[in-house]
Amino acid sequence: MNLAQFLAGRLVKGIIVLFAIAILNFLLIRAAPGDPAQVLAGEAGAADAQLLEQLRARFGLDQPFLTQLWIYLKGYLTFDLGFSYRQQQPVLNLIMERLPATLLLTGAAFLVSLVVGTAMGALAARRAGKWSDSLITTLALMFYATPLFWVALMSQIVFALKLGLVPNVGYETIGANYTGLARALDIGQHLVLPALTLGLFFTALYARMMRASMLEVAGADFVKTARAKGVSQARVWRRHVARNAILPVVTLAGLQAGQLVGGAVLTETVFAWPGIGRLMFDALVQRDYSVLLGVFFVSSAMVVCFNIATDLVYRIVDPRIEANA
Amino acid sequence: MNFLKRFARNRGAVIGILILLAVVAFAILAPTLYPQSPWRPVARPFLAPFVNERFPLGTDTLGRNLASGLVHGARVSLMIGVVSTLVALVIGVPLGAAAGYAGGFVDDALMRFTEFFQTIPSFALAIVLVAILQPQLGSIVLAIGVVSWPPVARLVRGEVLSLRSREYVQAAVTIGQSTPRIIFSQVLPNTIAPIIVMGSLMIGSAILLESSLSFLGLGDPNLMSWGYMVGAGRTRLLDAWWISFFPGFAIFLTVLALNLAGEGLNDALNPRLARGRE
Amino acid sequence: MTAPALSIEGLTLALPAIADRAHAVENVTLTIQPGETLCVVGESGSGKSMIAHAVMGLLPKAVKPVAGQIRLAGRDILALDEQAMQEVRGREVGMIFQEPMTSLNPVMRISDQIVETFEAHGLHDRATRRARAIELLTEVGLPDPPRLAKAYPHELSGGQRQRVMIAMALALEPKLLIADEPTTALDVTTQAQILKLIDNLRHRHGTAVLFITHDMGVVAEIADRIAVLEKGVLVEEGTADQVLGSPAHPYTQKLLAAVPSLTPAVLPLLPDTAPVISVEGLGKTYRKRSLFGVAREVKAADDISFALVRGETLGLVGESGSGKSTVGRCCLRLIEPDRGRIALGDLVLSELKPAELRRQRKRIQMVFQDPFASLNPRQTVGRIISDGPVAHGTPRKEALARAKELLELVGLSANAIDRYPHEFSGGQRQRVGIARALALEPDVLVADEAVSALDVSVQAQILKLIKDIQSRLGLAILFVTHDLRVAAQICDRIAVMQRGRIVESGPTAAIFADPQHAYTRQLLAAVPGGGRFGH
Amino acid sequence: MTAKARGLRFGLALAASVLALGAATAQEPKKGGTVHVVVQPEPPMLMQGLNQNGPTNMVAGNIYESLLRYNEKLEPQPSLAKSWEISPDAKAYTFKLQENVKWHDGKPFTADDVVFTLDKFLREVHPRWRPIVNAQVEKIEKVDDLTVKIVLKQPFGPLIITQEVASAPMIPKHIYDGTDYRANPANNTPIGTGPFKLKEWKKGSYIHLVKNEDYWLKGKPNLDEIYWQIIPDAAARAVAYETGKVDVLTGGSVDVYDVARLLKLPNTCMTTKGWEMFAPHAWITPNVRNGILGNKQFRQGLMYAIDREFGKDVVWGGLGKLPTGPISSKTKFYSADVPKYTYDPAKAKELIKASGYKGETIKLLNLPYGETWSRWSEAIKQNFEDVGVKIQIENTDVPGWTQKASNWDFDLNFNFLYQLGDPAMGVARSYISSNIAKGNPFANVGGYSNPEVDKLFADAAIAPTDKERQDLYTKIQKILADELPVLWLLEMDFPTIYRCNVKNLVTTGIGVDDGFRDAWKE
C-alpha cells in the first residue's frame, strides 16, 4: 500500500468515526438535565416563561429534536460548528481563540514529558537493578500516583506564592502589553507550572514504558549480534536498544497527544489557562450545546489527526511497517 | 519456581501488598474504629493534627474528624476503584474476546467501536457522563468504567488473537468443543494473568479519576471519598494543610501500592520480562 | 604444529541456584586448530550453546564461569575486562546465531550494520568501510550487493539474512568463527547452501570454526572433529570419522542410532480398500485485504488431490511456505478451504454445516508440532484427554477412565492423569497430544510436523509410537513434515509440495530411489549427511 | 412625608451628592492607574439589557448606566437622571436627564433612548422590568429631549427602586430600534454611556475596559483601565490576590475561609457594604407538595433542628446575620415581631414525631455554587439526621439545579434570593400563589399557597404610604414565620476584599456593580 492510499484510507475512516462521535455527543448532551435558556435565566436571578421562550427560540431549541440534529450535522458537513448564542460568537471563533493556548500547554507538556520520560526510562533500563534504576522507577511511580490537581495546587503554593519564582495563574501578564520576545518570555514564565504539572504524569508513564521496552529489546537477538561485533555497550544501548525501544513509546505517546488536547480540563481550571478544556467545562455547566459539541468535535478531530500523524511517523521510522501494512 | 516465591523476591511488590492490606484492613475496620459517621462535626474546626489524641489527624473545616473520614474514605475509594474496574472489565473482556476470537468482520466492527471510544477525550467524556447522570455513586462508577474499558478490550483482543492460533485452542476445535466453551475454558483462563495485572493498575487509575471528578465538584455528596476530602480541603491548603494533605497522601499511597503490586504480579506471572531485573 | 585457534581448558560454568542442575557445563576441555571445524553436538539443554557464549564473553549474567580457561590466540579471555573483550569480539572471533529473522537490527540498513563492525574497531575511513561492506556481501554470494546494502533486514529472506550475518562475522577476518545452530531455522536447500558457504570461506581464509548443532546430518556434512556433550559433560571427542564411524560412548551411539535413515524403511503392502479420506481439487488462496489498491494473493493450496486407505501413511513434504501445513489443516477444516471436496468415507466433510461439522470432527484428529503450545497449561492431562469425548457426550467419569488407558497406550503411566503439562518433558507431552487425538477414536490422523520440535532420540521414540498405534488401530495418517529422513522412515507414500502444488507423489521407496521432478531431486540432494546414516 | 416632598428632597440632594462623596474620603482623588479585578465566572456577554447574570452586571455596570443610583440606605441618587419628581397622587414620575451625555459611539443620549429602553426594549426582554411595566405602568412618554415621564396605573411605591443599572440599563435606540435585539451584532461591542468602554475581551482570560474620555461627569472616572480577570479556581484566585496579580476580589469570588487569612495580608481591606440593594437571603425551600413536607409541624421541627449559628459561624466564617423571617433586616419594612426559632433538637424531635414522620428519606438538593454551599448541606444533613430525619444530598451542576428547582423536582432545595430593595420586588415572589409556575427557579417553587398572604402582599405593594405598607408587611412576616414556607438560614454578607489603596470602591447600595466611576488608586 502506498502512502497516498494509506492516508486516504485513514482519513475516510477518521471522518466516519468523527461523524459517529458527533451524533453520539449530540445525543449525550441532550440527555443532560437543563438547557441553556434555563441556565441563562437562572443565572440572571429572575426569569419568566416569556424570557425562556425567547431564549429557546433564539437557541433553536423550539425546533423538533431531529430537525435540530439535522441542522447540526448539516453545519458540520460544511465546517460550520454553529453559533453560541450565549456568547454571541460563532463556535469556531471561540475555539480558535482558545486552541493556541491549549496547544501550547499540551505541546510543551507533551514534549517535556516525552523527552524527560524516555531519557529517564532509558537510564533506568541501562542501570537495571542498580540504585539509580530504583530511584528513577520509584520517582516515576510517585509521579504516576499523585493526583494531578493536588500537584497543581501544591506547586502554586510552593513555587508561586512561597518562592515567588513564577506566576501562579494565567496565560500572560494582563495589562503588561508585552510584544515580541518579551511577550514570549512572559508567556513562557506562565507556562512553566501548568506544563510541568500536566507533564508529570506523562513523564512517569513514558519513563515506565521506555524502561520496559528497553529491557524487552535488550534481550533481542540483534543486540547480541551487535555485541558480538565488538560494539561498545554504550553504543549498543544507544543505537540498537534505544532506537528500537522508543518506537512503541512514541506510538503510544502519539495516540495520547491527541487525548491531551481535550484532557487538560483540570490543569486549565487550576491555572486559569484559557484553553479549550476549560471552554468545554464552562460550556458543559452552562449547557452551551453548540460550544460543547464543537469542542468535543475539535478535540476528537485532534485525536484522529494525531493518530494519523503517529502512523505516518511510524511508517517513516520503522521500515518494517510498509511490508506488513 | 512458583508464583509466590517470584512475587516475594520483588521487594517493591511486597511493600505494595502490605500497604494495600493495611488500607483494606482500615476499610474493613472503619465502623469499629470510628463508629460515628465521619460527617458529624465532633470538635472545633481546624484542629491541628498530632495534638489531640482523639483526633490524631486533626479536624476539617466543619470540625469533622479527619482520621475517621480517612478510614471511611478508604472504603468508598476502594469500592469505587474496584467496582468501576469491574465495570470496565465486564465491558472490555467480552468485547475483546469476541473481537479477537471471531476475527474478520466482527473484529473490525468491534475494534472500530473501541477506537471510537478512544477518540473521544476520555476525561471530558467522564465529566459529561457524570453531569448527565448526575453525580452519584452509580453514575461515577459507570462513567469511570465506560472511559476505561477500551485498553482492556485491546489487551484481551491481543491475547485472544495470539491464543486463538495457539495449538491447544486448535486442538480444542478439532476435538469438537463448542466455540463458547473454547473461549471460556481454553482461551479466557489463559488471559487472566494480564487481566489481573491490568486490573490492579486500573483500580489505581479509577481512584485517581474519581478524585479528579470530586475535585471538579462531580462527586457523590453522600459518600466521603478521599477525592472529596482533598477537594473540600483544598482552599485551606495554606493554613490547614492537613485537611487535604492526608487524603491526598492516602490516594498517593494506595495508587502507589496498587502499581507496585501490579508490577510485581506482572513480573511474577510473566517470568520472561522479569529477566530484566536480574 | 601451530598454536590452536582456541583452546578451552577445564571450563566449568555455574548456573544460578534456581536451575535444575548446578553447572551448565562441567570441566570441558576442547581445542580447535586454525582452519579446522569442530562440531559440538548435543541435545537441547546439553550446554553446548553456553560454551559458544562463554567464548564470546556473552554469557547471561546469571551464568558464571567458575573454573577453567578459554585461551584465544594465547590470551585467557575469561580474565579480560569488558573493554578488552570488545576488542576481541568481531576482530578475533566472529559469531553467527540461529535465528536469522531476529538477529539483525530491524531498523538499520544492511550496510550500516556491516559498517558498524569496522566503526566499532576504528578501522578504515567511511568510503573504505562502505566498499568493504559491498565486497563482503559479494563474497557471501548475495545478489546485487549495492542494492542489497541499502535494504532493511525485513526485505531479505532467511537465507540471505544468514549470509549477511556471515559477512558481518567475517568482516574483520577473525581467526575463529562461532556458528551457533546457524542453519536450524532454515529450509533444507538453503541449509545446504549456507553450510557450503561456511565451508568455502573457512578454506579460503583459514578460519577455525566452532560449530554448535544438534543435527547429526549437519555434523556429518561439515565437521573435521566432533565433540559430544551430554548434560554439560564432554563424553566423547574425536575426528569426524572416528565419532561417526565407531562411536565409543553409549550416548553417542544412541544419538547416532536415533538419526532416521534416508533409505526408506520396508513397509508391508496395504490391501487395496476403499479410501477413508479422499481429497479432491482442494484449493486455498490467502488474500491480503486493503481498502484501496489490489489485493495480494498467495496460493497456499492449488488443486490438491489425494486419498488414504486404512493403515496408510501419506507424507506431505516440502519446505516452509510450500502449503503443506495449510493442506493438513484444510483436511480438518481448521482452515476453511476455498475449493475442493474432502470426504471421510461416505461423509463429505467439506459440505457440512458448522453444528454438524462439530459432531463429525471426532473422525479426523490432529497431532500438533509444538509440544509446549499444544497443551493448555491450565488443564490437567486427564482433562485435556477427556475433553474430546465429553464434548461428544461421554460422561466425564467414563472419559477419564478411558484417558488412563490411553495414557498407558502412549507409554505414560495412568497416574499422570492429575498432573499438569508443565510437569512433563517435550516427548511426554507429545504422547499426551497423541492420546488426546486417539481419545476420539478417529479414522484419520493428521500429524503436522509432529516430531520436528523434538530432540533426535525422543523423535525416534515418538515415530515408533505412531507406527505402533497405527498398526494396532489401523489409522490412516497424513504426515506433514519438512524432514525427508523422517518421511522416509514412516511414510508408505510421499507427496512433494512446492508453492501450493503437489509436484510429485508416489510410493516412498520409488521417490527416494528415482525422483522424477527436479525439485524433489534438489530436496534429496540437500539433505545433510547424505547417505552417511544408511544403517 | 408625601411622595412629592420625598421626591423633591432627593432632587435637591443631587447637587451635593458628588461633593459629598468627595468629602467622605477627605482626600483628593488621584488620576490614572489600572485596577485588576476578579470576575467569576466569565460573563456570557456584556450587553446588560439582554443579560443580567451576576458577572455581567459586575463588568457591564461600568459600561451602562441607568437613570438612578442608590446609596447604602437605598435612597435614590441621580445618575443619568439629574433630578426627578413624583406627582402628588404618586402616579406620575418625571425624570430630568443630564445634559451633554454621549453614547460611547459619540451619539447624544436623549429622552428617546429612555423611552425606547423602558417602553420597548426592556419590556420585551427583561424578566424583572417586564412584569412591572405590564402591570403598573400606564405609559412612558417623552416630554422634551431631556425629560421623560412615567405614568402609573395606580400608585406603586417600589417603582423608584427599579431604576438600578442591572434592572433598567439605558440602551442606545439608534443601535437597537427595529432590530432583532438578541441577534444584533452590537451585542459584542456594548455601547453605553458609562465611565468605561470595552476595549478587548480575551475569552477565558480577561476583559479590558478603558476610560471613557467623553464621560458626562467631568473629571470622572479617575482610573485609566480596569482588567477583569477570569480565574476559574477559587484557591487560585486567592493566590492571585496574594501574589499581587489582582487588586480586588469581588463578593463571593473567594472561599469564605480564605477571607480571614487574606485580611492578615498588608494593605488589605474588606467591606461587606455594597450589597444593600440585593441583601441576599439564603434558605431551604421545602416542597410542600411532597408528603410530610406539607406538614407545618414537620417544617417547624426541621427549623428547630438546624444549627443556624453553626452555619453562620463555621460554614460562613461568621459573616452574615440570622434572619427571622422573609424580609431581610437590611430591607425596608422588616419586622422583628415574629415567632423565633432557636437551635433545639429536643423540641425538633418532638415536633417531628408529632407530625407523623415515618422515616422516609428526604432529598436535599445542594446549590452548586461552590464548596461553602456543599459544606452547608453536609452540616444541615447532620442536623436533620440528629433528630431522626433521613436525608440524602443530591448534587448536580447549575443547569441540573435550575431544572430541578424550576420544575419542582426536589424535596428540600437550597437557594438564596435577592431582596431587590423592596419586599414587593424581591420577597413576595417566593410566597404568593400566583407565582407558582414551572420554569423559574426563583418563583414560588415550594408551592406554598395561602390566600391571606396573597392578599396581604398584593395590598402592600400598592398601599400609598410607607406606614400602611409596614403594617401589612409586619402581618405577613408573622404569618410566614409561623407557617415556614421556607426555612430561612442566613442574611448573607458577601465580603469584597481589596487593596486599601484602591479608594471609593464601594459607594452605593449595589457596590461594585455600580461601576468604578468614583474609584481611584493611591
Image (cartoon, coloured by chain):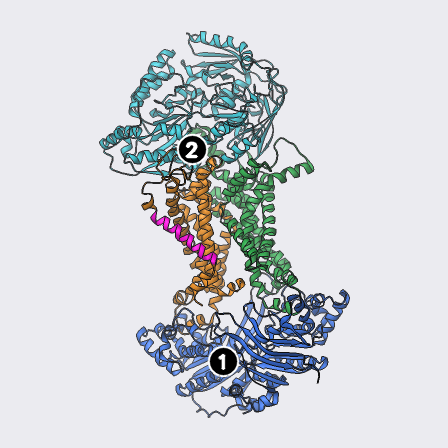
Chain colours: A green, B orange, C blue, D cyan
* Nearer to me, C418 or C242: C242
Q: Which residue is mark 2?
A: D372
* Nearer to me, D76 or C380: C380
User: In the rendered structure, which amino acid carries the disc numbered 2?
Assistant: Thr
Residue D464 in view of the camera: no
Using the numbered discs, state the Cα–Cα distance from disc 1 to disc 2 in whole angstroms.
76 Å
Position above or below: C490 against B39: below
The N terminus of chain D, quarter of image: top left
Q: Position of residue D471 (x, y in %)?
A: 33, 14
Q: Give a yes or no on whether discs 1 and 2 share a subunit.
A: no
Picture quarter containing residue D337? top left
Q: Which residue is mark 1?
A: C451
* Nearer to me, A203 or D485: A203
Residue span colored magenta:
B11-29
Q: Residues within 10 Å of mark 1 (few under 14, many from 20)?
A: many
Picture quarter containing residue D3? top left
Q: Position of residue D44 (x, y in %)?
A: 52, 32
User: In the rendered structure, which amino acid carries the disc numbered 1?
Assistant: Val
The chain letter under disc 2 is D
